[in-house]
Image (cartoon, rainbow, N blue to C red):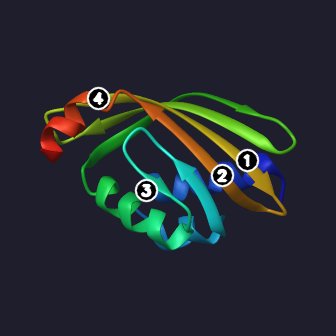
Amino acid sequence: MDTKQVVTNYHNAWTSGDIKTARVYLADDLDFQGSIDTFRRADDFIVGLTMFQTMLRGINLIQSFFSENGAALLYDCDTMSPAGVIRTAEFFTVRDGKITSIRLVFDATELRKLMG
């Protein structure tokens, strides 16, 4: 499976609520760095992703870019929180058919207020 298929399948799975399928595309030692959290294991990341997914009304994919070992997605997360719509940029590294790193960038100001 090439990078585009891996990232697209992962994105479609988690955004549709199929977290179990999304996990299949992540390397066990996933290196995730986001605007709020950092994780070094896919299983830990999946816990946070599951919680975030329950806040969503929907996702609007705006743009995607793919290379041999990397990808970038730009999308809006329509949340049920006071944060509303969150514009998000997500950058991926893929090796051997698995996502090995994710860099997630968004304005976390409103979400941090909710977290106290």
Query: In which quadrant of the rendered image does the C terminus lie?
Result: top left
Dot 4 amino acid type: Val
Residue 36: where, in percent of width, then height?
Answer: 36, 43
Tell me which residue sits at (35%, 27%) in the image.
Answer: 107
Real-space Cα distance between discs 2 and 4? 25 Å
Structural crowding at the residue carrying mark 4, measured as other residues with C-alpha within 10 Å and reported as few (<14), some (14–19) or many (≥20)? some
Real-space Cα distance between discs 4 and 1? 26 Å
| Mark 1 or mark 2: whose residue is earlier in sequence | 1
Residue where numbered disc 2 is placed: 101
Structural crowding at the residue carrying mark 2, measured as other residues with C-alpha within 10 Å and reported as few (<14), some (14–19) or many (≥20)? many
For residue 93, above or below residue 14:
above
- Dot 4: element: strand
- Dot 1: element: strand
Indicate which disc residue 16 carries: 3
- Dot 2: element: strand
Indicate which disc residue 85 carries: 4
* Tag 1 near tag 2, CB within 8 Å: yes
| Mark 2 or mark 3: whose residue is earlier in sequence | 3
Residue 49: where, in percent of width, then height?
Answer: 40, 58
Real-space Cα distance between discs 2 and 3? 21 Å
Q: Nearer the viewer, mark 4 or mark 1?
A: 1
Dot 1 amino acid type: Thr
Tell me which residue sits at (80%, 62%) in the image.
Answer: 97
For residue 11, above or below residue 85:
below
Dot 3 amino acid type: Ser
| Mark 4 or mark 1: whose residue is earlier in sequence | 4
In the image, 50 versus 33, the foreground residue is 33
Residue where numbered disc 1 is placed: 93
Q: Nearer the viewer, mark 2 or mark 3?
A: 2
